[in-house]
Image: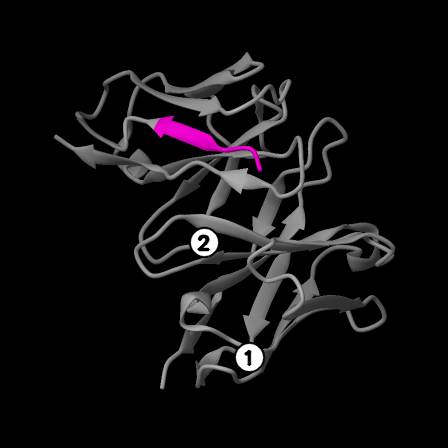
Amino acid sequence: EVQLVESGGGLVQPGGSLRLSCAASGFTFRSYSMNWVRQAPGKGLEWVSYISSSSSTINYADSVKGRFTISRDNAKNSLYLQMNSLRDEDTAVYYCARDAGYSTSFAAGYWGQGTLVTVSS
Amino acid sequence: DIQMTQSPSSLSASVGDRVTITCRASQSIATYLNWYQQKPREAPNLLIYATSSLHTGVPSRFSGSGSGTDFTLTISSLQPEDFATYYCQQSYNIPWTFGQGTKVEIK
């Protein structure tokens, strides 16, 4: 069974930093691209960042570019999101999501339960 | 960025009803369109990928169609567990973008 478990969320002041982790199990982690997607309270879904299976391709939403860094450790079956210079508008539940693995289209086929990041003074 | 617009934003329906949700892209995305279902306080779940293909384990009452800029999600006979918010998402271009969501409520 595919399992994705996020951790590292919490309350942080504006301008602060936080590192999110996503522990993967139940599949061959090194074979799949991964994403971070966030959801502000009461709002819709926003894609944040993508990393390919080998880390050779990385993309970011403009809203986080230059402040957030995605990475992965295939030996540890783990995905990370380093978040610096946090702003109020970064407050959200952050989900890690695995590529479904379909050749015809990228889709986020498996999601973690999410971790809440609250940026507030 | 490609803008995704869903309609309606919300709808009320009864168990057994046929429900249709539409999604429009601001430019052609071929068939790179996915649909997700999200229930309150839960993570989203993939329903349909590449416009019309059902993800593993998704009931056949869900179907999708369209191409280019106009897409549709149809639930042929609404079940109690289908009351949720539905999102479309394009995977044609980075950044992936989602529609604003359509909340399906009980009439």
Residue A23 magenta-highlighted? no
From where the camera sits, is residue B59 visible?
yes
- Secondary structure type for disc 2: loop
- Tell me the residue at 34%/47% (across/down): B39
- Asked if labels 2 and 1 share a chain, the reply is no
Q: Which residue is mark 2?
A: B43
Three-letter amino acid code at disc 1? Gly
Q: Position of residue B41 (x, y in %)?
A: 34, 58
Q: On residue B96, which mark appears?
A: none
For label 2, count other residues whose C-alpha is less than 10 Å away and answer few (under 14), some (14-19) or many (20+).
Answer: many
Q: Position of residue A9 (x, y in %)?
A: 50, 77
Foreground mark, 2 or 1, reads 1
- Secondary structure type for disc 1: loop
- Tell me the residue at 59%/62% (across/down): A64
Residue A26 higher or lower than B32, as above or below: below
Q: Which residue is more in the foreground, B29 or B11?
A: B29
Q: Which residue is mark 1?
A: A8
Q: Position of residue A46 (x, y in %)?
A: 49, 50
- Tell me the residue at 50%/24% (across/down): B25
On the picture, is B15 further left or further right than A83? left
Quarter of the image for residue B19 reads: top left
* Span highlighted in magenta in the image: B1-6
From where the camera sits, is residue A1 visible?
no
Most extreme residue toward the left is B107
Q: Position of residue B57 (x, y in %)?
A: 54, 34
Residue A70 higher or lower than A35, as above or below: below
Three-letter amino acid code at disc 2? Ala
